[in-house]
Image (spheres, rainbow, N blue to C red):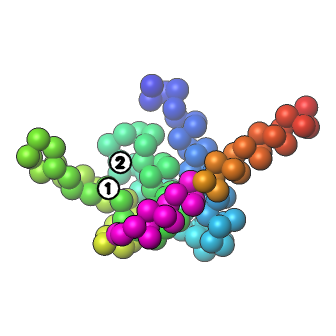
Amino acid sequence: DDLANWLPARLSALLVAAAAWGLSGMASARASVTVSLRDAGLHRSPNAGWPEAAFAGALAIALGGPRVYASESVPQAWLNAAGRHELDTVDIDRALKLFGYGCFSLWAAGALAVVAC
């Protein structure tokens, strides 16, 4: 699983950065790449940290951090720790728009590849 997802995880971070550029501009894309490169390795999964860090950077929010499992507090690193920690429904809407833009971008790239072949 980890080996099979190694490349797709990193490509997804680039896709998120491209979507951030199209949706919010170059600063958002740059933050997405910067946070991905800096923080992806902080995630306990070798692959999940890449798209999560990309979203955190693009949206200027902190993701991850300590959590509770079975009434036990489990320490975890923050992705984009300097980002906003207090999130609300507006942030969910922004994340969904970024996700949708990324999905459309992937579809468009695939369509262009098919047409080019």
Residue 108 higher or lower than 6, as above or below: below
Q: Is residue 67 visible?
A: yes
Q: Which residue is more in the foreground, 83 or 111? A: 111
- Which residue, given by chain and number where applicable, does mark 1 sit on? 64
Crowd around label 2: few <14 · some 14–19 · many ≥20 (10 Å):
some
Q: Residue at x 52, y 34 (%)?
A: 6
Secondary-structure class at tag 2:
loop
Which image quarter holds the C terminus?
Answer: top right
Q: Residue at x 35, y 69 (%)?
A: 87
Specify the quadrant of the image occupied by residue 31: bottom right
Secondary-structure class at tag 1:
strand
| Lower position in the chain sequence, tag 1 or tag 2 | 2
Q: Residue at x 57, y 59 (%)?
A: 98
- Which residue, given by chain and number where applicable, does mark 2 sit on? 43
Marks 1 and 2: CB-CB under 8 Å? yes
Expressed as whole percent of the image width and height from the top left, the position of residue 47 reads 45, 40
Expressed as whole percent of the image width and height from the top left, the position of residue 18 reads 66, 58
The span picked out in magenta is 87-99
Judge left or right: residue 91 versus residue 86: right
